[in-house]
Every structure is written in structure tokens, then in C-alpha cells.
Image: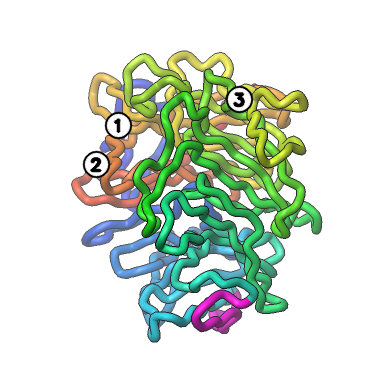
Amino acid sequence: MLNATDSFAGPGVPAGLRVVPLTDDPQRASLIYPDEPAFLTGNRMVFHSSTGPAVCRFDEGCRIEPLFEDRWPRHIRVAPDGTAVFAVPRRREPEDRLKIERWDAGSGRMETVFEADGCLAGTNVPLTRFNLATVSSDGRRLAGSAWLGDGQHADAPFGVIVIDLTSGQARVVAEDRDFNNPHLQYCRSREPEASHDLLVQMNHGCHSDAAGKILCALGPPEEGGCDIHAVRDDGTAWRDLPWGRDGRESCIGHQVWRGEGRSAATVVLQNTDRSYGWADGTRQEVVAGWPVPARRDEHRGRKHRGARRVWLSKGVRRSRFCHLHSDRTGLRFAFDTFPRFDGQRAGMEIWIGSAPDEGVPLAFRYLLNSGVTFNAANGYHAHPILTPDTRWVLFNSNLSGRPQIYGITDFEWPSF
């Protein structure tokens, strides 16, 4: 493998750290978003290439190959246990038909697991509106979102929809005007009860027109900002996560289940920061918490009387964290930051953090500056993730002039 360590050298980079370019795409390669599973059994990472979904085989010298032999463009979601990829053809023929396929990571066999015409079975939701977002840990259910408007009224709700692959039926389990970008994530725990939990994001103050076009994705500070909830995938057991809604902090929309456990972690902004993290001198902290039973109309967040949370970035000077990714234990994390100038280049920094248990702050270590300057227009960010063995931190960078994926290895995890 080639060595790109010198390209990312800079102030504070740990001695002995090694950076390896994993892709050499003629146009663009990028990682799957940090809140989504990306690894298959056999230490294979799924990523986005310019020719469609591809796989990097870490156990074979990081060899790259297409995920699907036919290379037909598909929208994909990797199963949490790495045994399968669920795929939706990006071009539907006919347009009013939905087909969801399951690609087996062991045999490479593709099978159709769900089909519908017109509306999702069990609902009156046109299937063309459904966006697949997440897969349950047992692989039996899929969840996504859809706009539920009638084309006549503004501020129509968006729905959280669950498809049961055993029955072939779909169900709208929750709906609200503020579910415009819910970042749905099934809990990765394999416990039968926990496997039904979904993280749901609410962007309070959202407004849309009669056609469902978003006019305001998030309201002003007085609306209380974004908050996060957990709900069972049958629509019951509504809970609050203890973040935001106190006038001081607001969720950024970057949250993850903490490994395969029942708690979660997020990055929070200062609620009155209208720069959304850009302004110099603002702080973006990392916090963790456990879902607390709540009424659906409360949205108390941090103010909930049963709130239980941990300030993970406590003690970090000039905390500027942005995206985060957790390993399966929930005790090791990778982070990027809002862009900072280190005296050599501006870019999103890459950090790691670890803790001995869920109840204490993380110990942090800086790794390098990715050179990515957070282009909000194209969504290209550093988006670091950990490999399952936590020996590598992977990240996006366009420092070479072309967006590619790099791996950091030979680093030491911080001690507690």
C-alpha cells in the first residue's frame, strides 16, 4: 500500500502515525455516512465510488472491487451485522413500483425481499415517496421516511414508516411536520426488545409548502432547536434523549447509538449560535445519554426530570466537534471537527476518544488535519469511521485535488 503520511504531516500529528490512501478513483470516492453501518463480514468495507457501491477488502491488501457484479445503480443500506446489503434500484421501471433486494454477503446471491405497486402495502403512502434509511439488527424490518402531504396544504407531516419483511406489510408508526430529516437509525443491539428501537430526529420550526418542498429546515433559536427521540417501531414507547431544549444547547443532527448498547451520543451546538458552528469562538460539545419515557408533546430534552447524561468532551479546550462514529462497544469513537487552521492548512481535524465505561468522559487524542473545508453545498465532509477492530480510522479528503478515502493506522488510543 502507498504511504500518504507526509501529505498530512502538521503540528501535533502523533509520531509513528501512518496514513494510507485506500482509493484512487478517477472522479470521487467517499465513505458511507458515519451513523450508518458500512462493514460486511470478512473485514470488507462498503463505500461510494464514482461507478457505484464498491468494497474495500482489508484482509487482502485493501483490494477494491464493485459490490454488485452488474453495477446497476442502487440506493443501499448495510445490515448492522454485516451479513447483507439491502438495495433499492435508483431507476424504477415502471415508476410506480418499488422493489427492495437483499444481497447476501456470504454467497453473493441477490433476492427480492419486498415488492409493491402504487402504495406501500398497509398504507396509502405512494411508494415513490419512501426513502429507505435503516435495517433492524435482526434483518427482519426496514425503516424509512416519506412526505405524507396531500398536495393542497402546507406544513404537512412527514412519516416514519416501517416495513415488516415477514408479513410484507408497511406501517406509518409516527408522523410530524418536524420529521423532515429524521436520520432514522435502528438500535444495533441484538436483544429482541432493543432491536425494535429507532432514533428519530425532530427539526422544530420546520416549514414546507403544499408540494412538500422544505422552506425552512430548522426554526430560529426560540423554537428550541433540533432534538432526538427513541420510539419503538410499532409507534409505542416514545422517549426523549436528554439533549437540547433548554435554551442553551441544540442538537446538530449528528447522533449515533452508542455501539450495540441502549444509550446514544451526539454533538450539540450552542442554541443561540446562528452560524451553525461556523463562528470562531463557538463550542460544539460531545454528550451521551439514555432515552427517558416522555409524552410526545413535551420535547423537554435536557430538562427532562429523568435525564441521565454524560459530558463526553469535558475538559477539552476549544471543543469544536462535528461528526462522530462509535465502535461496537460504545467506548471508542472517531470524530471530525468544524474546520480549523492549524498554522499550515485549514480543514476538519480528525480526533479519537475512548473511555473505560459509559459513565465517564472520554480521553481524546488529535490525529491530523484532513484538509476538508466543509463544503455545505456538496456535503463532502471528513466523516471519519472506525474499522471493527479499531485499528484504523478512515476519513474522506480532497487534499490531493480529488475526493478520496484514506486510512490512519499505527496510532495509540488515549489512556484514561
Mark in front: 3 vs 2: 3
User: The disc labelled 1 sits on which kind of residue?
Assistant: Gly
Q: Is residue 161 left or right of residue 148?
A: right
User: The disc labelled 2 sits on which kind of residue?
Assistant: Leu
Q: Is residue 396 visible?
A: yes
Contact between marks 1 and 2 (CB within 8 A): the answer is yes
Quarter placement of the N terminus: bottom left
Q: Residue furthest right?
A: 192
Q: CA distance from mark 3 to mark 2?
A: 30 Å
Among the two numbered marks 3 and 2 on one chain, the one whose residue lies closer to the N terminus: 3
- Assess disc 1: are there few (<14), some (14-19) or many (≥20) residues with their C-alpha within 10 Å of its C-alpha: many
Q: What mark, if any, has residue 288 been given in the picture?
A: none
Give coordinates of residue 61: x percent, y percent.
43, 60
Q: What mark, if any, has residue 399 been given in the picture?
A: 2
Q: Which residue is mark 3?
A: 312
Establish if 43 lies above or below 240: below
Q: Which residues are magenta?
A: 106-121
- Assess disc 2: are there few (<14), some (14-19) or many (≥20) residues with their C-alpha within 10 Å of its C-alpha: some
**How is the protein colored in the picture?**
rainbow
Q: Which residue is mark 1?
A: 347
